[in-house]
Every structure is written in structure tokens, then in C-alpha cells.
Image (tube, rainbow, N blue to C red):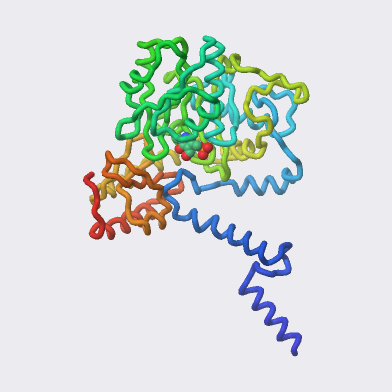
Amino acid sequence: MKTRMILIGLVILIAAFPVIGTAESAFDPDTDLLLQDMAARSHSTHDNSLGYPGNEDIRLDGFYDWYLKNEVGHAMMNNAGDPNDVTEDHGAMRIENEVIRFFAPLYGFDPDDVWGLVTMSGTDGNNHGIYFGRHCLVAETGIEPILYVSTEAHYSNMRLAELQQLETRLVETDEMGRMIPEAFRAALDPDRPALIVYSMGTTFKGAIDDQQAINAIIDEVSPPAVYRHVDAALFGGYLPFSQYRGMVDQSTCRFDSIAVSGHKFFGMDEPCGLFFTSREVLEKQNPYQITYLNGSMPMINCSRSAVNPLKFYWLIKTVGMEGFSEMATGMLENAAYLKKQLDEIGWPAWVSSEMSNTVFFAKPSDEIMEKYTLAPDYDDRFGGDLAHVVVMASVTRVQIDSLIEDLEAELAEIELPAA
Ligand SMILES: Cc1ncc(COP(=O)(O)O)c(C=O)c1O
């Protein structure tokens, strides 16, 4: 009887605390607690997160099933090599090549003339753009270039320019965050090659630099050589699947390379990205012919993930053109909806253009900032403190309505700047 009571007590205990101290756990209670806390937070902090550009609608369950079922994780895979020219594949370079060939035409590159990579992140793509750009310009002219980038561009560009020891000129922006063409003209040195980083969606205001206007100035001033890199970390994900696809088309915009983040629009579950340039640019790089790898290594990193290309491939085959297009359309509709709702309740709010999924507005209370994980910024031109929502595919109208309801309730208590 006593044994039965003890057993019943144990069952109740295990049911009440399903993880801590169960017989199945391979870990000590502290480790269990830490892991379970992380697992719980991975859901709770993301459920209502509207301020950062992560698509929480991750559709990789099927991928993980396939990965486990086929024991792919039992092998150490490494895409250490050029995925555009695969001789030996010790990782998933042929699949990476498929990913490159799928995306290349969406950015206006000819799949037979493109050179691309699945990178570690948007920053990694920008690093390649700036590095390739400098090498191209020096190869063409023998003169060190000057890098031009807007003051509202992502800080990674400034950091990378510093890392690559490039003379950098920051170009002022208008209030919506776009590089001011006349400020660019004033900064442009006619005697030095120009390496320009265009922002295709600045991080806070979602501004798109006017490539046509800047290109017209370049044509007029005619510096010795020009290289254009586009930092399209977020917008480069969805624009190709929207009615604004021409904005990221290399064949009409004349850019030399483009970097996109994989974990923003596409719904990858860890950092990665895409980088594209042309064979002409590649030919001006140091090929780094590496004997032990039996090939050329023009890219910056030696080891690269083989799993991210697999996941990308999985998304291409499962979500595909149709799914990505639905996501892109839905995001832009929901961004317009959010802006309209903010206008209706009289909360000062702005969107840089109809191509942007980023709505910025007067900063609400800390409680609301925290509840929706909103990102802050400051700009005198909009009355000071600001917040933004990045309307990703996972952002729902229910979440938007909830935010609007909370903001409306706060209207009476808070002093807002004029719209
Ligand atoms: C415009 C822009 N460029 C680059 C980056 C950096 O991208 P990643 O986080 O993929 O390195 C970001 C990140 O938010 C960004 O908004």
C-alpha cells in the first residue's frame, strides 16, 4: 500500500513538473531548467514581436523531419568551395547552386552569367559587395576608391568600410531617410573611383535611395570608375515578389552586386543571406587558387554552412514563387492597413513609400514598447522619439488591431508631436 502511495505521488509530481527531474532527461536539473527556459522564451518573446524584421512564420518542420529521418546531421558538412563552379561536393554546394540559379533572375541576373553565394547574413553580403567593389575599382584604375553611403544606412556598411580601411563619405538624407542627390553631388570626388552603397530599405524608416537620380549625377560627373552595391537586407527579400520587382532588377538599375538577408523575409530560422554579382566583377577579383581545396576561393569565408542552402532549397520547393508572392502582397497590404489605422486614431505615423513594409510613428509608452517589442529611434524632424513596426508576413491584423487599441487608450494620457 505504502509503495502504491509513493508511486501515485511520483506520478503526480512528474505530471506537475513535466521536465525537471524526469527519468527521460539526460541532464541535471539546472541544465534542464536553462534549456526549458530558453525553449519557452523562444515562443513567448516572439509571439508579439512587431518591431524587428524577422518572419516568425517559419515553415521548416518538414525539413527537420527529412533531416532527421535521413540522418543528414550525422555527417559534418561544409560548403567550403565555390558553389558556382562545383567540382567536388563535400557539402551541399550543388543545392546551393540551385538556390543561386533560382534567385538570380529575380534580381535581373542571367543565371549563366551570375556569381552568387548563400552567405552567413546580410552583413556578410555587404562585406562581399564592398570587398569586391574595392578590388574591381582598383583593378580598373589603380586608384583607391571613396565609399559613399547614406547617414541612415545600416551601420554594418560603415563598420565594414572601416574594417576594409576605405575612405568613407557619409551622405545626408532627407527626412524620409533617402540619400539627398544634391548632397551626393557635393560629396562626389570626380578624380577618385566611386564605390556606392545604396540602401534598399533603411533599417528604421524603410527608405529606398533613388538609384536613378544618383546614377544621373554619376553619369554627369563621370568619376574614373564606379561600383554600385545594393544593401537590400530586408526589402530585397520581398520586392522581387511584388509589383515593385523592377526596383531590384540589376539589368535596369545597373548595380554590380546585391546583398539580401535570408532570415528576414523568407522565414529561415537562423541568420543567413544571399549575395549576387556578375562574372565580370568576379574576373577582377583575386581568384585565390587553393591547392588543398582543389579550386578557386574568391569569397571571403572558407567554411560556409551547408545546412542553410538546404533550408533555402526546401523553402523554394515548398513555399515557392506563389507562396513568396502571397507573403509579399500580404505584408504590403497589412503595412498600408496599419498606417491607415494609425491615421484614423490620430497617432502621428509615416511610411517612406508604398514599397515599404516599415511604418514609423511617435513613440508610445514603455509598456507598449515592451509589449510589442517595438524598436526605438530619434529624429528631431518628426518631433523626437519614434518607434516602428516592421510588418513581416507573420504579422496579423489581430496583432495590428491590438496595438491600435492600446495606442488609442493611451492617446488621452500622452502628448504627441504633430503628424
Ligand atoms: C538595411 C540593413 N542592412 C543590413 C542589415 C544587416 O543584416 P544581417 O542582420 O542579416 O547581418 C540589416 C539588419 O537589420 C539592415 O536592416
| Residue 95 against residue 377 in the figure, above or below | above
Asked if residue 27 is positioned above or below residue 386 in the image, the reply reads below
Compared with residue 122, is residue 73 higher up or lower down, i.e. above or below?
A: below
Taking the spot 73% from the left edge, 62% from the top edge, the residue there is 26
**Quarter assignment of residue 5:** bottom right
Which image quadrant for residue 180? top left
In the picture, the quarter occupied by the C terminus is top left
Q: Residue furthest left?
A: 418
The total of numbered circles placed on residues is: 0
* Residue 194: x %, y % from top left: 45, 17
Q: Which x, y percent locates residue 265?
A: 48, 40
Q: Residue at x 56, y 42 (%)?
A: 268
Residue 237 percent location from the top left of the image: 48, 35
Tell me residue 53's x, y (percent): 46, 43
Q: Is residue 312 left or right of residue 392?
A: right
- Compared across the picture, whether 310 is left or right of 335 comes to right
205 sits to left or right of 159: left
- Can I make out residue 174 in this image? yes
On the rendered structure, is 70 left or right of 374?
A: right
Residue drawn at (33%, 46%) of the image: 386
In terms of depth relative to the viewer, which is nearer, 412 or 326?
Answer: 412
> Is residue 353 visible to the viewer in this orientation of the structure?
no
Furthest toward the right, the residue is 292
Residue appearing at x 71%, y 35% in the figure: 78
Q: Quadrant of the N terminus?
A: bottom right
State the residue in front, 106 or 220. 220
